[in-house]
Image: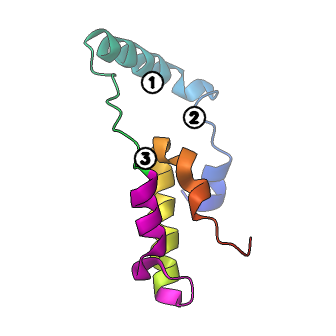
Amino acid sequence: MDTKSTQDLDNINNPVFTKVNKVLGKKCVELKQQGLAKVKHTPLTCKKDLQKLNECSVFDINSPVTLQNKVLFFKIMLYFCGGERQKLCLFRPVYC
């Protein structure tokens, strides 16, 4: 399939996927009953450590390479470390 045809594909509401969605739903319930759906939260990074990261030369915004480091690092943090979103406001540059 090309990209255009996959954009219109609705695998949740399409009747072709009804049986698969039911099996997936049952499997999710089964895993929850086994206790495998629990999430272990890690402690948030302290403000002092976040400040060190923000001041680090690896995340300098004056160089394209280090700016990319900063963007990629915090983009990954947003997607994989949900709790850290609460403190991302500490990294806003002064000129914003």
Q: Which residues are magenta?
A: 47-65
Tell me the residue that label 3 is attached to. 81
Q: Nearer the viewer, residue 8 or 89?
A: 89
Query: In the rendered structure, does residue 48 fall within the stretch colored magenta?
Result: yes
When the figure is inspected, residue 60 is found, relative to residue 63, above or below; the finding is above
Q: Position of residue 48 (x, y in %)?
A: 42, 57
In this figure, which residue is indicated by the disc labeled 2?
A: 11
Q: Position of residue 72 (x, y in %)?
A: 47, 69
What's the amino acid at mark 2? Asn
What's under tag 1, amino acid-wise? Val
| Disc 1 residue crowd, few under 14, some 14–19, many 20+, Cα 10 Å | few
Vertical relation: 26 (above or below) 6 = above
Mark 3 residue crowding within 10 angstroms, few (<14) / some (14–19) / many (20+)? some
Q: Nearer the viewer, mark 1 or mark 3?
A: 3
Query: Is 26 on the left or on the right of 91, as rendered?
Result: left
Disc nearer the start of the sequence (2/1): 2
Q: Position of residue 5 (x, y in %)?
A: 64, 54
Observer-nearest residue: 49 or 36?
49
**Disc on res. 20:** 1
Q: CA distance from mark 2 to mark 3?
A: 27 Å
Q: Secondary structure at mark 3?
A: loop
